[in-house]
């Protein structure tokens, strides 16, 4: 949430480098942007409302610059509220939430601020300490101790060389190339320059100057050494290539990503299963799409290993936190590994001695680093806001984990699960061709003018109905709602009227009966299933994948959501009001 990016090096095009990097972070926030360049000791600021991808600005030569692409939290979308903020000698960009900003703002003097943001107050506090004679590290340390909440900040101070950055709870990493150092909230910002990374941990600070990078502990001020890590992501992978949108590219990448997720070392899967075996309470925690994946995992575990797992939306977990102790396993599913709702529960759970397993796409993310066992998705960068390839990779890993659990409990064989996933991956591979997408496009054309849509599924296809609703809502803005097929007659069926599109996931006899109930009330019934039923007005075929059916069923649903967005003239990569990687609560 909010992209931040800085560069300091020997090249004089720092402003252009920052703009280019922010464009690659745009999925983190896209309502406004700003860049600060440092030129002959002076800071020059350029801030605009609108998407950074549309920015055309030309900068004067400079060797240092930093910028921000915003997802508004405090204050509307205006030039004044966009970052970087300048207060006194300090220029600062921030990602996170400064919970107790209001009292500091009042003490400093509300009238002295240009914006409504919490972030400008951080700049003011650092400035206050600098004016009192603190050196930059002390000023940032003192300010950090005044902040309640999460932050990643990048800043410069007039009269002091270089750029500073610090974090607590929001992601920040440093990229190192031969002629420059970069600081960013996500790797894609600097991937075209380098894939050598130092990860900043919580309560750490970094100071970058031309040829000098200094890391220190934010609390003690002591300098620290950081390991150089080479990330396996390529710049090419982070580009759209021949695809019009990242969302479509990522849907098609599922040809390979599911099999990459399956090829986890079996020992790693087994060590995660052992964590479950040693605990007597298992909570799967996740948000949004990842939460629907966790809900599918509940069916996988029940069917495959006979284990009852608890699935809780991370934001709702505080109610159940008193159940967490040293015999609890917390299984976090998070593509980004930075989702604040998930991270906070894990941090508190860790303190209580809970064991943590994470299923994440970013192996050095905050969620991964707090975990006892990390199961990587290996899906490559996911840039579209709507999660697609990460979701199916997460499902594949949950399916494997359930098989590893079954093997440990003497109820099944791990390799049988892996083999079924291999077959599923091959079947999805065959499905993903332009003709299939064209067929779904033709179905989308028939329903694109409708404002309401309902989706039903049974068993593990029920959470897929909920996920289908998220995908359709977020990219096409059609009101879509998912239901357990058998629940229809207990209320939701009252919503059905003439020509309302209803997606029916699956073709089992009970679901087909429910489809008939819908049809009898005038619904337009669209079946997404291995076989065609007479009740379907339209049919989208999915291969029969037995226990992994939910994974295969999600793929055409993703394509349908994408096609609906395109037909409605919307940009599926950047849906309104959303951002990827939700680092605020
Ligand atoms: C929807 C979507 C979101 C994310 C959610 C969790 O398509 O992408 O609902 O699934 O914000 O994000 P992660 O997985 O990064 O924790």
Image (tube, rainbow, N blue to C red):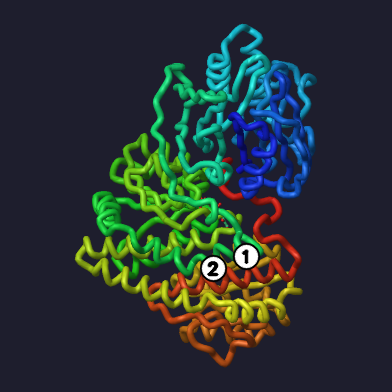
Q: Who is closer to the viewer here, 302 or 359? A: 359
**Would you say 65 lies left or right of 406 here?**
right
- Label 2 belongs to which residue? 252
- Secondary element under disc 1, as helix, strand or loop, is loop
Whereabouts is ligand 1, in terms of quadrant? bottom right
Q: Position of residue 144 (x, y in %)?
A: 55, 22
Which quadrant of the structure image shows residue 515?
bottom right
Q: Who is closer to the viewer here, 388 or 103? A: 388
Q: How many marks?
A: 2
Question: Which residue lies at the image location 48% right of the left edge and 72% below the top edge?
Answer: 461
Q: CA distance from mark 2 to mark 1?
A: 10 Å
Q: Position of residue 267 (x, y in %)?
A: 25, 55
Residues tagged 2 and 1 counted as in contact (Cβ below 8 A): yes
Local packing at callout 1 (Cα closer than 10 Å; few below 14, some 14-19, many 20+) is few
- Label 1 belongs to which residue? 243
Residue 314 numbered mark, or none: none
Which quadrant of the structure image shows residue 18?
top right
Which quadrant of the structure image shows residue 110?
top right
Quarter containing the C terminus: top right
In the depicted structure, whether residue 376 falls above or below residue 75: below
- Secondary element under disc 2, as helix, strand or loop, is helix
Quarter containing the N terminus: top right
**Would you say 420 lies left or right of 170 here?**
left
In the depicted structure, whether residue 353 falls above or below residue 565: above
Local packing at callout 2 (Cα closer than 10 Å; few below 14, some 14-19, many 20+) is many
Q: Who is closer to the viewer here, 120 or 30? A: 30
Residue 34 visible in the displayed image = yes
């Amino acid at each position: 949430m909010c992209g931040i990016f800085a560069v300091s090096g020997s090249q004089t095009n720092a402003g252009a480098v920052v703009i280019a990097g922010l464009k690659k972070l745009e999925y983190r926030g896209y309502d406004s942007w700003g860049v600060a360049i440092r030129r002959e000791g002076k800071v020059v600021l350029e801030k605009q409302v609108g998407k950074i991808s549309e920015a055309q600005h030309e900068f004067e030569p400079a060797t240092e610059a930093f910028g921000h692409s915003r997802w508004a939290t405090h204050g509307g979308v205006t030039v004044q509220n966009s970052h970087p903020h300048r207060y006194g000698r300090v220029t600062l960009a921030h990602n996170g939430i400064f919970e107790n900003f209001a009292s500091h703002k009042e003490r400093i003097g509300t009238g002295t601020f240009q914006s409504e943001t919490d972030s400008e107050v951080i700049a003011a506090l650092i400035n206050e300490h600098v004016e009192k004679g603190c050196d930059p590290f002390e000023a940032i340390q003192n300010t950090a101790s005044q902040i309640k909440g999460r932050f990643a900040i990048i800043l410069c101070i007039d009269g002091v060389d270089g750029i500073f950055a610090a974090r607590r709870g929001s992601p920040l990493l440093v990229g190192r190339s031969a002629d420059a150092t970069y600081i960013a909230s996500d790797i894609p910002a600097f991937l075209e320059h380098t894939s050598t990374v130092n990860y900043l941990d919580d309560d750490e600070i970094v100071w970058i100057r031309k040829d000098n990078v200094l890391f220190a502990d934010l609390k003690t001020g002591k300098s620290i050494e950081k390991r150089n890590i080479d990330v396996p992501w390529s710049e090419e992978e982070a580009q759209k290539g021949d695809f019009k949108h990242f969302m479509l590219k990522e849907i098609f990448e599922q040809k390979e990503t599911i099999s990459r997720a399956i090829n986890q070392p079996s020992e790693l899967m087994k060590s995660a299963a052992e964590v479950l075996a040693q605990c007597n309470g298992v909570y799967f925690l996740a948000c949004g799409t990842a939460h629907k994946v966790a809900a599918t995992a509940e069916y996988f575990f029940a069917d495959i290993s006979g284990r009852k797992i608890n699935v809780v939306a991370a934001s709702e977990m505080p109610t159940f936190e008193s159940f967490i102790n040293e015999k609890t396993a917390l299984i976090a599913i998070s593509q980004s590994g930075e989702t604040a709702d998930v991270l906070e529960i894990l941090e508190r759970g860790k303190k209580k001695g809970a064991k943590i397993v994470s299923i994440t796409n970013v192996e050095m993310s905050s969620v991964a680093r707090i975990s006892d066992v990390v199961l990587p998705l290996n899906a490559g960068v996911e840039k579209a806001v709507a999660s697609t390839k990460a979701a199916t990779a997460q499902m594949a890993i949950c399916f494997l984990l359930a098989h590893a659990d079954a093997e440990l409990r003497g109820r099944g064989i791990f390799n049988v699960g892996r083999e079924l996933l291999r077959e599923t991956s091959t079947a999805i591979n065959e499905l993903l061709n332009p003709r299939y997408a064209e067929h779904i496009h033709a179905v989308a054309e028939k329903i694109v003018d409708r404002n309401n849509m309902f989706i039903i599924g049974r068993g593990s296809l029920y959470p897929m109905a909920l996920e289908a609703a998220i995908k359709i809502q977020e990219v096409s803005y059609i009101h879509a709602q998912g239901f357990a097929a058998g629940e229809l007659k207990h209320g939701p069926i009252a919503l059905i009227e003439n020509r309302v599109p209803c997606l029916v996931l699956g073709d089992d006899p009970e679901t087909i009966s429910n489809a008939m109930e819908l049809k009898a009330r005038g619904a337009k019934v669209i079946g997404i299933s291995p076989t065609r039923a007479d009740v379907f007005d339209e049919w989208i075929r999915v291969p029969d994948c037995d226990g992994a059916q939910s994974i295969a069923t999600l793929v055409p649903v993703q394509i349908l959501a994408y096609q609906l967005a395109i037909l409605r003239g919307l940009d599926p990569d950047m849906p309104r009001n959303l951002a990827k990687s939700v680092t605020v609560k």
